[in-house]
Amino acid sequence: MVGKMFIKKFYISSIIFSILIHIIFSDETTLIIPPFQHSMGYYKANSTIAKIFLKKNVNFERVSGISALKLKQLDDRTTNKDDAILSLFGLNDHRIVFNVGLKELKIYGSKGNSESPESLYYPTDIAVTPDGEVYVSDTYNYRILKFIYDDDSLFFESSFGSFGFDSNSLNLPKGIDYDGKKNLYICDERNDRIVVLNDKMTPFMIFENIVKPHTVAVVDPRKGSLNIDEKFIVVSSARTRLLKLDLYGNIINEFFSHSITAYKNIDFNFIDYDLNGNIYVTDTVNSCIHKFDKDLKYITSFGREGTGKKQFFKPEGISIYRKFGQVFIAERTGFQYYWIGVDGYIKEFTPSFLTDSTKGLTISLFTTEQCKVTIKIFKDNNFIRELTTDLKRNIGLNYIVWDLKDNFGKRIIEKGKYLLRVTLEPLYSSRGYFKKEFSDEIEKY
């Protein structure tokens, strides 16, 4: 009988725990699902969806890098109605896959271990410039391939590398990205270095002693759509450490995966950045996205493993179209599409309770994105004070002070619980479409 009661209690507790976990994760808004009019309700592109829209079978296997952008040759300068319609280039099953507008999906290459440009062998990453230059790290062919996109097709132009250890060779090239001068940065993983090519595909810089560089993102305002003037590089080293480098390979900052204590093991996989230089990193082990500010200060993690909303299955590549904050994430079963939102919470009150002798209250408010903050205070459903209205605050921890006065300038005297209702409105991406609302209480004795 005792055993049955224990099992019953354990079962009920498990249900409650599962519900709580679902609520916690389902309410995440660091990234948000685009509104229906911008996605037609399809924010996940799996094999089934691809077949419906493209009238052909598309199997997702060995998905890796992805690049989303607006190609100059496909941009109709007479209207802005097509500005959010992007070109997506991805690597899937040893092939390059790319869309032609909203009408067609094209495929280039096949699995092979040869010198032919159509022969790809476990390619890792893809980088595309607005001018239509397409770079692919053909990892187990030990080379970088350069194509030109023109007339809805890919044309091979040149290649760099072969297996080796000198400046003209590569040993497992992985992540790639380019800077504002179209220099290409290559993670030469087993040579523990980053090789930099100029726009003629000739090496001119090598950053030595970068342990097992896996992926790279070059933050450079010359590439466009960036609100900061700083130029820097972010590298995943051995998939356990993030490095912030200057454009000459000097380490500015670093972040170790064990610093995020909520997870046992972390896999820093692919990297990209947004309009404000915030860094996003996919994590295949935990099926989530980690977000950092431009100085590699950890902000939050988004998502978990699953097939539901705001869930991923082994996310790989990530690409952010910075102009509008559109986020594209490649996972083992396809692709997902998000907008940058905002999330937050009240970390603490100082002091933790109020008395007649308390002179003021400091509200420690944490936000995952730059935003406007509105705070309204109530007691017993009666409005007391509008503390802030559309107050602009930066990403991370913010401090807001209440002088314990009501809207008429009179000091509050009633004892009991005071409710603070907080509204966060993003300044970017989902602005005008989304607001985050939550509340917390503090008691006056």
Image: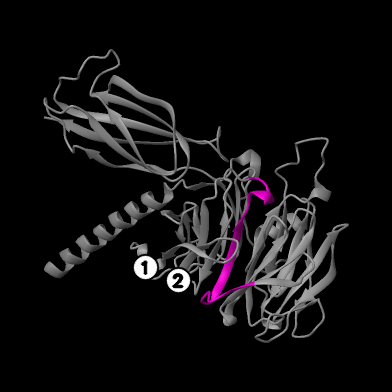
The three-letter code of the residue at mark 1 reads His
Residue drawn at x 49%, y 67% is: 268
Looking at the image, do the residues carrying marks 1 and 2 touch, with CB atoms under 8 Å apart?
A: yes
As drawn, 190 above or below 332: below
Residue 240 position within the rendered picture, expressed as x and y whole percent measured from the top left: 45, 71
Quarter of the image for residue 170 reads: bottom right
As drawn, 343 above or below 119: above
Residue drawn at x 25%, y 24% is: 403
Q: Is residue 48 left or right of residue 398?
A: right
Residue drawn at x 78%, y 85% is: 114
Residue 66 position within the rendered picture, expressed as x and y whole percent measured from the top left: 65, 62
Which one is earlier in the sequence, the residue at label 1 or at label 2?
2
Residue 345 position within the rendered picture, expressed as x and y whole percent measured from the top left: 35, 42
Tell whether position 390 is magenta: no
Is residue 318 shown to the viewer in this render?
no
Q: In this view, does 304 lie to the left or right of 385?
A: right
Which portion, as a residue range, is magenta?
Answer: 206-225
Task: Report, in whole angstroms, how far the alpha carbon at label 1 lies from the one at label 2.
Answer: 8 Å
Residue 257 position within the rendered picture, expressed as x and y whole percent measured from the top left: 41, 67
Q: Residue furthest right?
A: 151
Is residue 5 shown to the viewer in this render?
yes
Q: Which secondary structure, mark 2?
A: loop
Task: Name the residue tied to disc 2.
Answer: 240
Quarter of the image for residue 117 reads: bottom right
As drawn, 170 above or below 321: below
Residue drawn at x 81%, y 67% is: 147
The three-letter code of the residue at mark 2 reads Thr
Q: For residue 258, which numbered disc appears in the image? A: 1
Q: In which quarter of the image is the C terminus?
A: top left
As drawn, 418 above or below 121: above
